[in-house]
Image (spheres, rainbow, N blue to C red):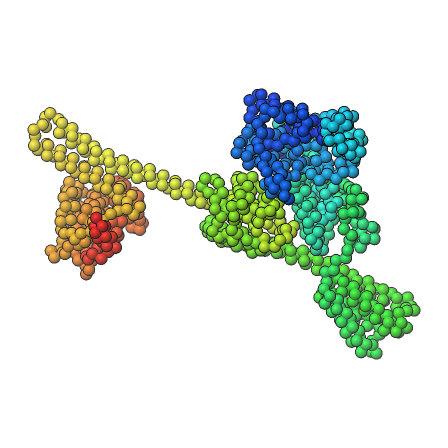
Amino acid sequence: MYDEHRPDPDALLAAVQHEEAKQQHGKLKIFFGMSAGVGKTYAMLEAAKQRLADGVDVVIGYVETHHRAETEALVTGIPIIPRQKLEYRNAVMEEMDIDAILQRKPQLVLVDELAHTNVEGSRHPKRYQDVLELLASGIDVYTTVNVQHLESRADTVAQITGVIIRETVPDTLIDIASDIELVDLDPDELLKRLAEGKVYTPDRAELASKNFFRKGNLSALREMALRLTAEHVDQQMADYMQIEHIQGPWKSLDRLMVAISPSPFSEHLIRWTRRTAYTLKAPWMAVYVEGPQPTNVKEKAQLARNMSLVRKLGGEVMVSPGVDAASEIMRIARTQNVTQIIVGKPSRSQLQEISRGGSLVNRLIRISGNIDVHVITGDESAESENLPVPTPVFHSTRSQYFTAVLVVIAATIATQALAPAIGYVETSLVMLFMIVLLANFVGRGPIILAAALSGLLMDYLYIPPRFTLAIKSLQDGLILGLYLIIALVTGNLTARLASQKRLMSQREDRTQALYSLSREIAQATTLDDLLRVLIATVSKAFDADVAIVLPDSSGDLGAPDPHSTFQMSEKERGVAEWAFSHSQASGRFTDTLPNSEAHYLPLTTPDSVAGVIGISPRSTQPFTVDQELVLQTFVSNIALAIERERLHSAAHRASVLEESQRLYTTVLDSISHDLRAPLQKIDAALEELLDPYNVGNPESEHEAADIIKHATGRLKRLVNNLLNTTRLDSDRLQFNIQPADVRLLINESVAAMQPDLDTHELILDIDDNLPLVPMDFALMQQVLENLLQNVVTYTPPNVRVRITAKMDGPQFVLSIADRGPGLPPEALAHIFDQFYVVPGKATRGNGLGLFVCKGIVEAHGGTISAENRPTHGGARFTIRLPAEINTPVAAQADKVASQS
């Protein structure tokens, strides 16, 4: 049964994830105040003293005492990390040494003046970015900040105080703070402290009291600080209620969307949206509709700042091309489940709005349906000062205007020749047909010019009274008016189609780039091929040098891929390592080490960071909006492709490991059986020897000795097979090639296997005139014994076994044939594979004997084969060896012998 009071699962999950994210990082405590002088630093030092007394490892990263005696007294006793000295404009400046803090790794670090801007050359432009890195490293931070330094409050503070705040911090720092302590002070008390010189020096205090530190300003700032602190506490309470399942008014969250443009006023809209979203505890996003009109360099820079502000304040940015901005905004709003749209009040005149197709606000309100639309006004002075004056944008070239004039003149001359035969009404139709044809080749401007010029020429040349611009009848005026209207509408429709064509071309280029990347990724078969095609594709798409760096086996960032076209210096490598360890973009075009040569992006996957890609554009201009979108998609696809290859490699390794484990179990079982059988025989023979009744009985002793000798021989063959298998795998098997008597080799091998061969009928077919054959006698004896052992194992008793030795031209041929059941046809291709055992046999070997035979024979420069005998049944193993010492192994053996 549905319970309308149950918690919203999405909100509950978001609260739990938010709490877990806080626990995985260092904790941030903000000492918050309405302005300088309220005692934030003093309160922070007092709290730090208490933590120090509780045994917490506390250090001072950066504290500014402003030479206040009571503040400096609190600093005493707290360890201080020496500041980093940087030279800037022929002066030595001091900044917080973040590397020294990370190396020291304290539990808690004090960082004053959170909104401070670092000196050029520091790792981060802003101190709050240093704090974020400390938090990411698991270090707790105490810091101080005033309400006017919050990004979303900066414009409001400027309106209240008249002072533009240059140093700001993102409001997301308030969101991630585990605790905010409001350091409050009555405005009158603060003014008293200011007059006593406890805030600024006397000369600065007098100036401040007349400007920023007016009582009305302080009261407004105090209200803002109290309200923001209350909102934060309320958010903490809401999260607590979610986690603890406390009943409440569990309403669905709103979703806000702000429409932005390349205008400075968009910054005000973004801040307003962020404040409202925070109050409503709602997600928010910003959308920019990229129209057909191109943007200049100044507008691109402003748009980039607006988008950066959205991301800094925790919003999501979406860019979409479109001719009709209102329709595109509503389409995105409906697909993203937006409940409220925020737009700016139009600053243009009504005539300008009409010339641009009507007011965006009015159109949004008409088509918004059940979505609320907020129209936000801005500061008029700032708006009039910063907004660019609308200027006409010409898409057509001069040649198109020239062509339009020539076509009109040519058409006029042609109709002059037809004028005696047709009337001026028919002439207007001919001219109109000419305008329609011309619209397929030129833009809107030339069409408007052609329509106006042709209309004037028609009036002057054809409409009576001729050779004047006067119009005497209503019919003539109607004809001319309709002609002009139809021509202008045709030109406007043509321009719109051209704009849509350009947008479609942009989308097609973007899709083609992504398709090319996907195709190259799909065709790559190895990680090396994948990285090669990725670097080539990104380099071509962005006209840049590219480097991809993946982590090594230890998890640290390794060396750049050899296919990289961008050579990274030590400094650049440090920037890449920062992007990798913090999962954030760094380097060129970012706020982290912006003076770098390349733009570094982490290749982030849902589970980890697969590496870093560095892009060094050959152009000095920052990426366009469209390029940024394509780059983000590229990076996502590259990260997933690399992760796919890694998972594929991991799966292959797991498969190999599983197969190795299976083979290990099989071989262990087989070897255990092979060991157990001779050991049991040795144990039984020893018991016979130790039996008092058999002591002094030569027959029993001889029989037991034969059993032990035979069992020991089996153990020796097993050990030799194991050792030689390992040596063959590592190419460390050594040979002693000498001319050998083949008859002696066969006889000694048969003698060693005699007890097992007693149950079979053995026939030796050896040519009398065999020459000495070069071989390693001991190793070839092992080969022959393994083949005989294989016959004994897989054939029943009383089966005939024939050993044949003969010469076949320059080759020596040795074969062992039996009349047993033969080999299964499917086993012939794998019979010499390592650990392969013929399936379906009651008696199983260990899969090493024939593998060792093949390795030794081939190392002699020979071949070994297995086949089923077609006539008499059974199996035949054939060895072919060169009869002269001309093999690589023989040459190697001679070299070793000469060296020894």
Q: Position of residue 715 (x, y in %)?
A: 21, 38
Question: Is residue 759 left or right of 403 when viewed as pictured?
Answer: left
Q: Vertically, is 108 above or below 774?
A: above
Answer yes or no: is residue 643 visible: no
From the viewer's side, name the closer residue of 796 and 611.
611
The picture quadrant where one finds residue 236 is top right
Question: Is residue 474 left or right of 498 when viewed as pictured?
Answer: right
Question: Is residue 871 left or right of 625 when viewed as pictured?
Answer: left
Q: Residue at x 54, y 45 (%)?
A: 571
Q: Position of residue 89 (x, y in %)?
A: 64, 44
From the viewer's side, name the closer residue of 449 and 769.
449
Q: Residue at x 73, y 52 (%)?
A: 324
Q: Position of residue 494 (x, y in %)?
A: 73, 61
Q: Vertically, is 513 above or below 343?
A: below
- Residue farthest to the front? 90
Q: Position of residue 606 (x, y in %)?
A: 54, 40
Q: Vertically, is 598 above or below 555?
A: below
